[in-house]
């Protein structure tokens, strides 16, 4: 089996409602850690940890601007997740097709 | 923020190459725990744990057949992941559109 360390990090990063919320928020525009923390009602330290996980997965980039840390969407746009989902869906579709062919072939056979 | 416990479990279940491999294998047809374990070169106990995570996420169902445990794809077909990805992509597209409009509007203004 091929190993996908990057996609593992991507899926793990997405397995949390706050982190998905941060991506949605940054999709609407850049924000500092404290601007991100406030609507979620969590501490700066808590938000920093979530942002770190997103940064490790290359879903978010951060840059120090004065005393604040500005966050924006990173270079990865979930292409790896989309590709895996697409491959998996094609595989299930092919299985359904084979099942359909089997039904078609057995339709003419006597009971 | 809305909490999505089920989608959290789905993303966490997908954050492992063996578990994604199991889904791909079951997409081609049902299999027992030992049939799943063998090609991955992992122990039955190890595979049982992976299958349990997939079962908790409702991505896999299992049934005891004689002394074996037969695994098949569960009721969930990653619709929740697809829906979230689709929502997120629409949001990014809208942001790009707004950026395009902004460019369009500023094009006519004097330098």
Image (cartoon, coloured by chain):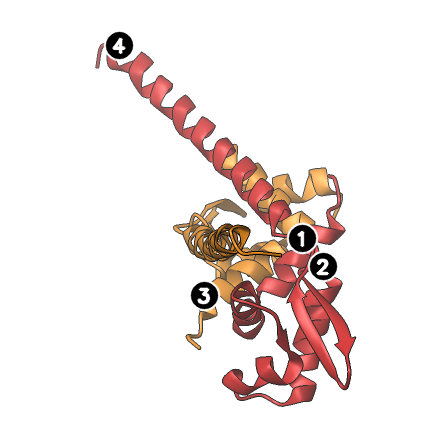
Chain colours: A orange, B red
Q: Are marks 3 and 4 on the same chain?
A: no
Q: Secondary structure at mark 3?
A: helix
| B101 versus B64 height, above or below | above
Q: Residue drawn at (76%, 43%), measured in percent from left and top?
A: A41
Q: Return the disc, 2 or 4, that comes first in the chain's sequence.
A: 2
Which residue is disc 3 drawn over? A6
Which residue is disc 4 drawn over? B109
Q: Residue drawn at (64%, 46%), measured in percent from left and top?
A: B80
Q: Return the disc, 1 or 4, that comes first in the chain's sequence.
A: 1
Residue B8's x, y, as percent? 69, 55
Check if mark 2's residue and mark 1's residue have beta carbons within 8 Å. Answer: yes
| B38 versus B65 height, above or below | below
Let me know if residue A92 appears in the view. Answer: yes
Let me know if residue A44 appears in the view. Answer: no
| View extreme (front): residue | A110
Q: Secondary structure at mark 1?
A: loop
Residue B41 horizontal side relative to residue B1, left or right: left
**Numbered tag placed on residue B58 in the rendering:** 2
**Numbered tag placed on residue B76 in the rendering:** 1
Nearest the viewer among A76 and A25 is A76
3D distance between C-alphas at marks 3 and 4: 44 Å
Closer to viewer: mark 3 or mark 4: 3
Q: Quadrant of the N terminus of chain A?
A: bottom left
Count of number-bearing discs: 4
3D distance between C-alphas at marks 2 and 4: 56 Å
Q: Are marks 2 and 4 on the same chain?
A: yes
Nearest the viewer among A37 and B20 is B20
What is the chain identity of the residue bearing mark 1? Answer: B
Closer to viewer: mark 2 or mark 4: 2
3D distance between C-alphas at marks 3 and 2: 24 Å
Nearest the viewer among B81 and A55 is B81
């Amino acid at each position: 089996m091929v190993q996908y360390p990057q996609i593992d990090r991507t899926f793990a990063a997405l397995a949390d409602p706050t982190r998905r919320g941060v991506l949605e928020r940054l999709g609407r525009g850049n924000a500092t850690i404290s601007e991100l923390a406030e609507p979620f009602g969590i501490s700066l330290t808590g938000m920093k940890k979530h942002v770190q996980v997103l940064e490790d997965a290359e879903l978010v980039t951060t840059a120090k601007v004065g005393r604040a840390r500005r966050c924006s969407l990173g270079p990865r746009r979930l292409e790896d997740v989309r590709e895996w989902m697409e491959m998996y869906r094609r595989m299930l579709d092919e299985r359904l097709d084979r099942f359909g062919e089997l039904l078609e072939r057995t339709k003419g056979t006597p009971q």
